[in-house]
Image (spheres, rainbow, N blue to C red):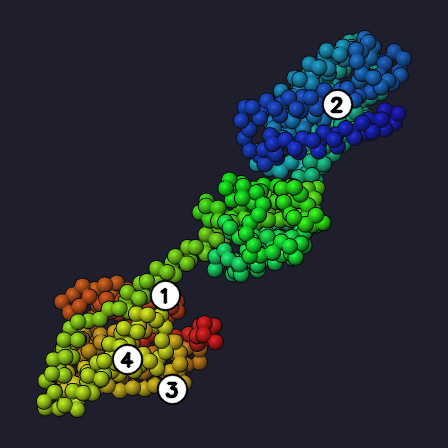
């Protein structure tokens, strides 16, 4: 038995080769991933595993029952000859991976081939090949991973059944009995181990590929996370320089470069003495990638370097796309084409796709910011013509009776409108300037309402340098007068408070006016409110600007009760001020 078992194990080396080759086929990867194969892939799988079984037959060892001698060459068999082989391994693999159909199909191919070789076990071995496909198909589990123990047991079981079929079908029985006694146990053990070995090799090969792919994906994601802060500004020389530097530190290549449509934006690594940023694109290969939008591998001649001793012997040039439009290229330089591996190409493709997405995000954010700024400018430009007319009427009425007062009001009105005009060209102003604007407005309104309006200020001077959007406070004060105090009996009071807190600056405007109902309060600041007294557009605009500038936590907080006044407040985060303006 040992005389046969050791040669059988030696021949299992063929399994290593076949297992590695089969991992290259797409249909087998589909089987491993437990996906449904289309008919063409099924036929390919049946043919491949069937040929695997045929190879197992040809690499077997012949045994002559009349002389009890083993041979090495398998061609035509005599009536007393049989084959100790590993045919069942290919059939068992077919059934375990693909199910009944592929297992039985592979068994038919391997079985018919074995029957054609002759010998007194030819028919029995042909039948047992088909039975092995049925047995292994029974153990096929579509939604469960295949275990090594299962492959070992199924391989041994299929070979055991073959021995039983030989005993039951092969004639004469005495020769079949002698054959089974001699080769049965070694074949059962060898084919069981061979089936498990086949699965183990496939697992290891695929696991290594998945591990390598995972490492490259992790590296690409890490690089994408590191570069996103630079690409937010778009594709330019500064962002390109920083991105190339980060990629060069992580990827084992000779140099990294980025271009736009006309210029080399950055070059980091070897040959930076003559491959310099700011120069126009020279190579036809780069121009071809910009034109075609497809990745290209350039050899030393295609790089078209004018320096003979240049260390850059080859390059992978990938297109940088934004919304499917090529806007530049990303180049990976190596010393020679031999260094361009499939792993490197996959990394380049993944990283290139991520950088393209970042550029799309940058464009979207820029468009959003431009739209936001345009909206802010439009909101800042709003001036109520009624306020102008009322103010001029008040000033006209005072020109004879109180000329000094009229002069003061004209100065206040001039300052007010000067602030409105300057607000259309600025996104930010200081709380100090904004408060001056409010005081100019209220000076005019106090004159209009004569003794019916009183204004107080509670201000922390330490908070006056904080930044705020122009025309934020004035609409809040105007809202107090128009909707809270104008129709109130008695004296109307307004308190403007600016207080510095631990982490925020609190800004509030309070009145003792007529207040509002809960229904009115729920809609104010969230949308336009059409009513006989106004639209609520001013409050809505202020609320939206605060949200744009500082975030949702700084939106207006409004508290009001009917006949009990209204308080409108918001906060300016100190950290935001420091990050943006220091």
Task: Point out residue 196 in the picture as x, y percentages from the top left corner.
Answer: 72, 33
Disc 4 target residue: 437
Cβ atoms at labels 4 and 2 below 8 Å apart: no
Task: Point out residue 483 in the picture as x, y percentages from the top left corner.
Answer: 18, 74
Between disc 2 and disc 1, whose residue precedes?
2
Identity of the residue drawn at 54% across and 41% down:
288
Q: Nearer the viewer, residue 387 or 473?
A: 387
Cβ atoms at labels 4 and 1 below 8 Å apart: no
Asked which secondary structure carries label 2, the reply is: helix
Disc 2 target residue: 56
Q: Is residue 195 visible?
A: no
For the residues labelled 4 and 1, the Cα–Cα distance comes to: 22 Å
Identity of the residue drawn at 35% across and 79% down:
431
Examine the image and state in which quarter residue 511 appears: bottom left
Between disc 4 and disc 2, whose residue precedes?
2
For the residues labelled 3 and 2, the Cα–Cα distance comes to: 92 Å
For the residues labelled 2 and 1, the Cα–Cα distance comes to: 72 Å
The local crowd at label 2, few if under 14, some if 14 to 19, many if 20 or more residues have their Cα within 10 Å, is many
Examine the image and state in which quarter residue 173 appears: top right
Between disc 3 and disc 1, whose residue precedes?
3
Disc 3 target residue: 461
Disc 1 target residue: 548
The local crowd at label 3, few if under 14, some if 14 to 19, many if 20 or more residues have their Cα within 10 Å, is few
Asked which secondary structure carries label 3, the reply is: helix
Task: Point out residue 64 in the picture as x, y percentages from the top left corner.
Answer: 85, 14
């Amino acid at each position: 038995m040992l005389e046969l078992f050791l040669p059988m194990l030696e021949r299992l080396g063929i399994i290593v080769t076949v297992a590695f080759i089969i991992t290259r086929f797409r249909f087998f990867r589909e089987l491993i991933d437990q996906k449904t194969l289309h008919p063409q892939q099924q036929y390919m799988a049946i043919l491949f595993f069937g040929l695997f079984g045929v190879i197992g037959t040809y690499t077997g060892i012949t045994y002559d029952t009349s002389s009890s001698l083993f041979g090495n060459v398998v061609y035509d068999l005599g009536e007393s000859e049989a084959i100790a082989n590993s045919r069942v391994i290919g059939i068992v693999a077919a059934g375990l991976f693909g199910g009944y159909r592929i297992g039985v199909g592979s068994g038919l191919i391997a079985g018919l081939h074995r029957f054609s070789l002759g010998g007194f076990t030819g028919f029995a071995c042909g039948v047992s090949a088909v039975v092995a496909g049925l047995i292994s198909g029974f153990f096929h589990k579509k939604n469960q991973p295949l275990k090594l123990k299962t492959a070992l047991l199924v391989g041994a079981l299929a070979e055991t059944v073959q021995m039983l079929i030989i005993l039951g079908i092969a004639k004469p029985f005495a020769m079949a009995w002698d054959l089974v006694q001699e080769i049965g146990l070694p074949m059962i053990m060898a084919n069981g181990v061979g089936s498990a070995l086949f699965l183990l090799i496939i697992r290891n090969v695929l696991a290594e590929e998945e591990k390598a792919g995972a490492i490259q994906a992790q590296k690409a994601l890490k690089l994408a996370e590191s570069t996103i802060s630079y690409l937010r500004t778009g594709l330019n020389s500064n962002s390109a320089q920083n991105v190339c530097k980060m990629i060069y530190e992580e990827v084992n290549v000779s140099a990294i470069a980025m271009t736009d449509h006309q210029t080399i934006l950055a070059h980091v690594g070897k040959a930076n003495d003559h491959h310099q940023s700011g120069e126009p694109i020279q190579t036809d290969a780069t121009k071809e990638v910009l034109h075609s939008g497809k990745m290209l591998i350039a050899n030393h001649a295609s790089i078209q370097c004018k320096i003979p001793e240049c260390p850059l012997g080859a390059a992978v040039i990938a297109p940088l796309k934004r919304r499917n439009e090529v806007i530049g290229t990303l180049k990976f330089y190596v010393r020679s084409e031999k260094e361009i591996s499939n792993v490197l190409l996959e990394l380049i493709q993944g990283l290139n796709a991520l950088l393209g997405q970042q550029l799309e995000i940058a464009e979207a954010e820029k468009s959003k910011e431009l739209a936001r700024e345009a909206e802010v400018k439009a909101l800042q430009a709003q001036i109520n013509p009624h306020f102008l007319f009322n103010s001029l009427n008040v000033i006209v009425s005072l020109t004879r009776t109180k000329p000094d007062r009229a002069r003061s009001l004209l100065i206040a009105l001039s300052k007010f409108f000067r602030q409105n005009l300057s607000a259309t060209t600025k996104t930010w102003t200081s709380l100090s300037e904004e408060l001056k604007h409010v005081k100019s407005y209220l000076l005019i309104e106090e004159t209009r309402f004569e003794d019916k309006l009183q204004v107080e200020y509670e201000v922390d001077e330490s908070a006056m340098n904080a930044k705020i959007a122009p025309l934020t406070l004035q609409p809040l004060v105007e809202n107090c007068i128009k909707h809270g105090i104008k129709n109130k009996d008695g004296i109307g009071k307004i308190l403007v408070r600016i207080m510095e807190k631990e982490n925020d600056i609190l800004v509030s405007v309070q009145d003792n006016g007529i207040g509002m109902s809960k229904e009115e309060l729920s809609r104010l600041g969230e949308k336009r409110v059409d009513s006989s007294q106004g639209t609520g557009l001013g409050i809505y605009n202020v609320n939206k600007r605060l949200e744009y500038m500082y975030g949702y936590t700084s939106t207006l907080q409004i508290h009001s009760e009917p006949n009990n006044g209204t308080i409108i407040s918001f906060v300016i985060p100190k950290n935001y001020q420091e990050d943006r303006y220091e």
